Image (cartoon, grey):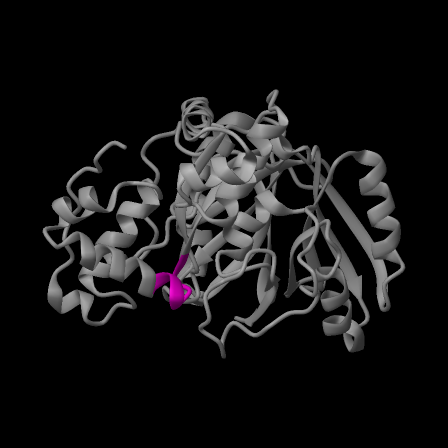
Amino acid sequence: MRAIPRLPRIPAERAAALPLTAIEAEVFRALQEDGRVAFTAVANDIGISEAQVRRTVKQLVAREVFTITAVADPRLMGLESMAWLALSVQLSQLERTAAALAKMPEVDYVVITTGARHVMAEVACPGTDELLALLKRVRALPGVQRTETYPYFQVLRQQFRWTNEEEPPAVADETRGVRSAPAELDELDRVLIGELQDDGRASFRDIGQRLGVSERAVSTRFARLVDEDLVRVIAVGNPHVLGFHALAWVGVSLSEVADPDAVAAAFGRIPQVSYLVSVSGRFDLMGELVCRDRDHLLATLNDRIGAIDGIETVEVFAYLRLLYRNAAGAWGAARSLAGAAEDSGATGTRDARTTHAPARPRARQDSNL
């Protein structure tokens, strides 16, 4: 496992006012680069003991600061039809409808938002037939008045880079992240990705024993998936815990003369953009913004998105409540697990504000923002 570069230190006086201590922030940052990096390498770079690194990681996971998980394009797992749904709902039925939507196994996460569409959700299905069947079930939910569907053409950016900094760091390397393209994976590849989504630091020996293959076979498969940019194992942070409380989904329409690739590239470089997709429908791009507060959100819209040439209109859907699968939830593992069979009994939601138990994959939570 490669060693990580020397991490920048955060001044002690500044760290005291931040959600994480200086050491916690450096450990987290290391695992954001490589969730499987050896703890000895992290310890050497930071200048602390391996035992302290191991203890820090355990504590941060228990506090739901992050989950170490595999991030991959869901299409690699056989989920070829992804879409964003926007629902107009009777106001008296908002929470009931959102909760019912969140129980559907094809649904990744659900938000109650401001704007013309009251409830929105990301969904993933094996194909268009399954997507159509899902839409029929969604339209039959209580209180649903109208639906809009935005099928995804491509996942353009999937970065989850929240830290102690005042804003997420910009992504300097355009090639970072996972490849958004179908690939020929066999069943062992898919099962291996699933194992790492449940536990990104699971030992290859244990995975091999569960799958009935050698440790070397697991290691070789994982190395190929990483080399081909098909999967990354990283620490995916919970932005609420890290002090990011203004989240929004944005729909972007381009001008007739805009260069779609150039706009998408510029948009994806904005530090607050955690997720970006190209879609079909009245929007050309849709993305998720993660900001500290409303002022930070407004500044992002005005100073960063507003400075991109070729954008004609931007519609903002601020999150009022978010229902998601786990502590990383809508920001990581859930996107790759969408459409998978739910664990027995994991059909409700729990409030992320009142519990600090370690996250359990595929269990849903909800959060007021």
Q: Is residue 64 magenta?
A: yes
Q: Tell me where residue 278 appears, x and y as whole percent.
A: 61, 35
State which quarter of the image contains the N terminus.
top left
Quadrant of res 6 = top left
Q: Is residue 265 magenta?
A: no
Q: What range is drawn magenta here?
A: 60-66
Position of 283 compared to 177: left or right?
A: right
In depth, the one of 261 and 66 nearer the eye is 66
Which one is in front, 110 or 234?
234
Spot the residue most to the left: 47
Residue occupying image coordinates x 46% and y 31%:
265
Compared with residue 174, is residue 104 higher up or lower down, i.e. above or below?
Answer: below
The quadrant where residue 97 appears: bottom right
> Residue 158, can we see it?
no
The residue that appears at 35% across and 38% down in the rendered structure is 171
Q: Position of residue 176 (x, y in %)?
A: 39, 32
Q: Residue at x 40, y 27 (%)?
A: 175
In the image, residue 255 above or below residue 319: above
Q: Position of residue 240 (x, y in %)?
A: 44, 66
